[in-house]
Image: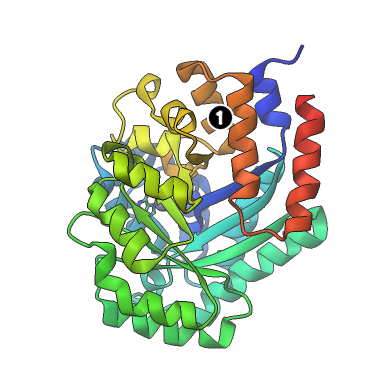
């Protein structure tokens, strides 16, 4: 009999909520800083790691934007992305849908082309080498204006073949989804799918807005939707997947204790919850660590583990045939 932890490691997994800039491991950050001759605020890897103590989302974002500031050249984006893909390939992740934050780099003079070429080439190399498939999600920074988001969308137009969706991230409270109504509308007209971070720190009303006003295809986080029974029903009616991030929730104090993580409750409510790592270099773990923490702390069952992996396959934007292929593998493993 395999343990649940062994099963969670072996099972084919999808990652649907991952910020590529949040995979920047301190060692790699220092190496790239050195080769680009830029200085960091911290002198050593240890000093930097010691700063990874957050009481809320903004604490983290301040460090996250500092960290990404050493990324200057196409090769930097390639190396960052490839390091992440290699890591999760070793964890039996078969498909990833990753965010990047163009505005976090454009503001520093790094072109859209530099960013996307580095990321896209790594995604394609992972597919060639390992058969790992991917989607790319361009995320708008919600603390900036809708006008800035529109400028970013304009820059993305030559690369629409490489971009599958748009998202909304950064500081949630005070920056509701409806602020970006027009740019999401324009994105949809270009054939892009739409997702948004909602209900991580923001109130249930922000999740309502994401669903009813923006018409999202997926909800990132969504934890606070559980405060509103009508909202729970709406999410179910629309078959919306929630991309839940357990270790992120713990590190950013969205939950106080992993034992109290709501993922079991989400499953009990028949919500399509999935497990994801968000910003693994900052939050203490990649996909397998997230599953392991849930297994150790929340007493999830084998059936629940299976459901989470299945939700990840079904909630992805893979073609139906590919979903069936991975579901078959999953069924065999759990039989
Ligand atoms: N929430 C909002 N914005 C983000 C996050 C997050 O967890 N990670 C990177 N940008
Ligand atoms: Zn996120």
Instruction: Locate residue 87: give its quadrant.
Output: top right
Q: Which residue is mark 1?
A: 291
Instruction: Locate residue 318: give its quadrant.
Output: bottom right
Residue 335, x across and y down, in percent: 79, 24
Closer to us: 60 or 200: 200
Residue 289, x across and y down, in percent: 55, 30
Q: Is residue 335 left or right of residue 19?
A: right
Q: Residue at x 24, y 75 (%)?
A: 145
Instruction: Locate residue 236: give its quadrant.
Output: top left
Helix, strand or loop status at disc 1: helix
Q: Residue at x 62, y 63 (%)?
A: 135
Q: Decide: is 195 above or below 146.
A: above
Q: In what quadrant of the picture does the N terminus appear?
A: top right
Q: Residue at x 50, y 25 (%)?
A: 294
Q: Decide: is 54 above or below 38.
A: above
Closer to us: 314 or 38: 314
Q: Decide: is 12 above or below 211.
A: above
């Amino acid at each position: 009999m395999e343990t649940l932890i062994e099963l969670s490691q072996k099972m084919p997994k999808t990652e649907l909520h991952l910020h590529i800039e949040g995979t920047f491991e301190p060692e790699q950050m220092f190496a790239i800083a050195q080769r680009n001759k830029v200085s960091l605020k911290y002198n050593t890897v240890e000093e930097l790691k010691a700063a990874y103590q957050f009481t809320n989302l903004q604490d983290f974002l301040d460090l996250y934007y500092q960290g990404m500031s050493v990324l200057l050249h196409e090769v930097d984006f390639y190396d960052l992305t490839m390091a992440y893909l290699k890591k999760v390939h070793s964890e039996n992740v078969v498909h990833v849908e990753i965010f990047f934050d163009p505005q976090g780099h454009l503001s520093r003079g790094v072109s859209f082309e530099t960013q996307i070429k580095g990321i896209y080439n790594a995604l394609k190399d992972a597919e060639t080498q390992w058969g790992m498939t991917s989607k790319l999600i361009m995320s708008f920074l919600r603390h900036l204006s809708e006008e800035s988001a529109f400028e970013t969308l304009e820059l993305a137009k030559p690369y629409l073949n490489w971009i599958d969706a748009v998202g909304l991230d950064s500081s949630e409270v005070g920056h509701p989804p409806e602020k970006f109504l027009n740019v999401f509308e324009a994105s949809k007209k270009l054939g892009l799918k739409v997702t948004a971070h909602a209900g991580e720190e923001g109130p249930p009303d922000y999740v309502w807005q994401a669903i009813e006003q923006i018409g999202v295809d997926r909800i990132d986080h969504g934890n606070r939707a559980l405060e509103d029974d009508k909202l729970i029903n709406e999410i179910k009616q629309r078959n919306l997947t929630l991309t839940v991030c357990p270790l992120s929730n713990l590190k950013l104090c969205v939950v106080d204790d992993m034992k109290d993580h709501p993922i079991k409750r989400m499953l009990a409510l028949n919500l399509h919850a999935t497990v994801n790592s968000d910003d693994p270099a900052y939050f203490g773990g990649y996909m397998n660590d997230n599953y392991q923490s849930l297994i150790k702390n929340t007493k999830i069952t084998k059936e629940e583990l299976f459901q989470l992996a299945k939700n990840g396959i079904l909630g992805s934007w893979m073609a139906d045939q590919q979903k069936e292929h991975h579901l078959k593998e999953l069924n065999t493993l759990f039989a």
